Amino acid sequence: MKRSEMSSDQQQGFYQWLNSEWARCNANTVSIENHVVTYLVGTNGGGVAVVAAFAGAANYTSWFVTAALAAFLIGLLTVGMGLALGHRRMAGITRALGADHRQFNKNEIDTVILENQHHERFKSVSVGSILAWVSFAAFWVGASISVYTFHDYVTLKAGQTVVAPVKSSC
């Protein structure tokens, strides 16, 4: 049924249904995106603080720290790009929905366009989640290596902790 063939009540009911579906999809997606980004920033932010503390205590900058921080920042960038790409795809679907919905009846929209919007949006969130976990793993591997690297600089053989790096002259 085309929009021109719908009664006023049918059109109002159709748009109410369409808006509720769109709102539900967006609410679910935003929740997932916020979870991914919050988890990534929170956990890796703690890791940055730990590594920075070791670096400060040793008064020594290791390339491991640089690599770990770079992995973290690159991870954030890639996740952000993945989510931005998802929003861009959704904007295209929104335009298509606005342009084409008059040619579909309710069931066709439900099975074609709404399935597409869920697929595109959640696909991008899945990619963002994978990138988040990859950057999470890369950062903590770098952080762990950094901690072991600093161990020799902050601890003497007798077990005394020093603020400056131990510089052996022998």
Image (tube, rainbow, N blue to C red):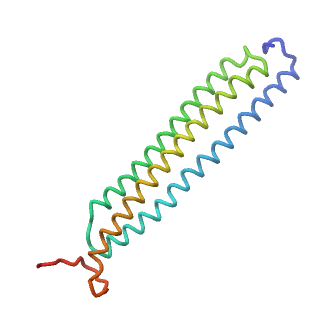
- The extreme left residue here reads 170
| Left or right side of 115 for 152 | left
Which picture quadrant has residue 111?
top right
Left or right: 13, with 141 as reference point? right
Residue at (62, 47) in percent of width and height: 32
Q: Residue at x 80, y 31 (%)?
A: 16
In the rendered image, the vertical position of residue 8 relative to residue 21, given as above or below: above
Q: Which x, y percent locates residue 149?
A: 30, 68
Q: Position of residue 58 (x, y in %)?
A: 29, 75
Which quadrant is home to the N terminus?
top right
Q: Residue at x 63, y 32 (%)?
A: 119
The relative height of residue 148 versus residue 80 in the rendered view (above or below) is below
Image location of residue 65, percent across then percent down:
32, 61
Residue 13 point in image, percent of width and height: 84, 27
Tell me where residue 97 sits by quadrant. Answer: top right
Picture layout, residue 101 above or below residue 146: above
At 41% from the left and 63% from the top, the residue drawn is 48
Which of these two is toward me, 155 or 71?
155
Quadrant showing the C terminus = bottom left
Who is closer to the viewer here, 124 or 142?
142
Rendered image quadrant of residue 167: bottom left
Q: Left or right: 128 with respect to 114?
A: left
What is the total number of numbered labels drawn onto the structure image?
A: 0
The one nearer the camera, 170 or 8, is: 170
